[in-house]
Image (tube, grey):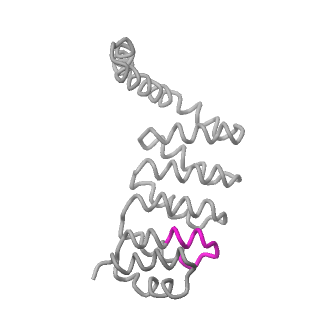
Amino acid sequence: MSKRREILLGALKDADSQVKKAAADALEKLQARERIDALAQKIATGEMLEKIKVIYALSDLRGPRVAEVLAKTLKDPVEDIRAAGVRALGNLGDPATLPQLVESLKDTSPIVARAAIEALSTFKDPRLLGPFMQMLKHQDPGVVERALEAVANIGDKRAEEAFVYFAAKGNPRMKAIALKGLGTMDS
């Protein structure tokens, strides 16, 4: 990493402000990666706001160690920490995180469940249809709405019955999403 650091430090002296900013941002990420163990400790023992800042800082990085640290946040007793962890894991875009994200759909907090649906929606994986369909039974309307959107984005004909149901019996937002889904799904 010393070669990377050397290049980034040199770029901080560039005449172009965009190059300087890109170098500063990259250097900040490199430093975060080098301090990942200390950051993991802050997540484990820090105050809520500090934990959330660290979680979002890590979400810009990639790699298995980052995913491992973020996955630990999913067991935090505070729902805001779990939701931030879910969003950050989803931001990684790493298919290896799918099991943890799917497990987060079962979280008792509607906030975490909503975040999990949104995070999983970025994967566009047809294997997620089943877990999303299960979320259509959730008691929280916001969770159901997000699940309907996720199912609509997959566009699988197996969801037709659910769309028909919500087009007739859902709240206005659910009806609109279901109608959109009926129009865009695979034939």
Residue 112 image position (x, y, % from top left): 60, 59
Q: Is residue 114 above or below residue 25?
A: below
Q: How many marks?
A: 0
| Image quadrant containing the N terminus | top left
Foreground of the two, 169 or 84: 169
Where are the magenta residues, as a range? Answer: 136-147
Foreground of the two, 165 or 29: 165
Q: Is residue 183 above or below residue 90?
A: below
Tell whether position 145 is magenta. Answer: yes
Residue displayed at 57% across by 41% down: 55
Tell whether position 48 is magenta. Answer: no
In-image side of 19 versus 89 (left or right): left
Residue displayed at 63% across by 72% down: 140
Residue 89 image position (x, y, % from top left): 49, 50
| Image quadrant containing the C terminus | bottom left
Foreground of the two, 98 or 146: 146
Foreground of the two, 9 or 45: 9
Residue 67 image position (x, y, % from top left): 48, 46
Residue 149: name its quadrant: bottom left
Residue displayed at 54% across by 46% down: 70
In-image side of 137 versus 24 (left or right): right
In-image side of 34 versus 40 (left or right): left
Q: Is residue 129 above or below residue 15?
A: below
Q: Is residue 69 above or below residue 141?
A: above
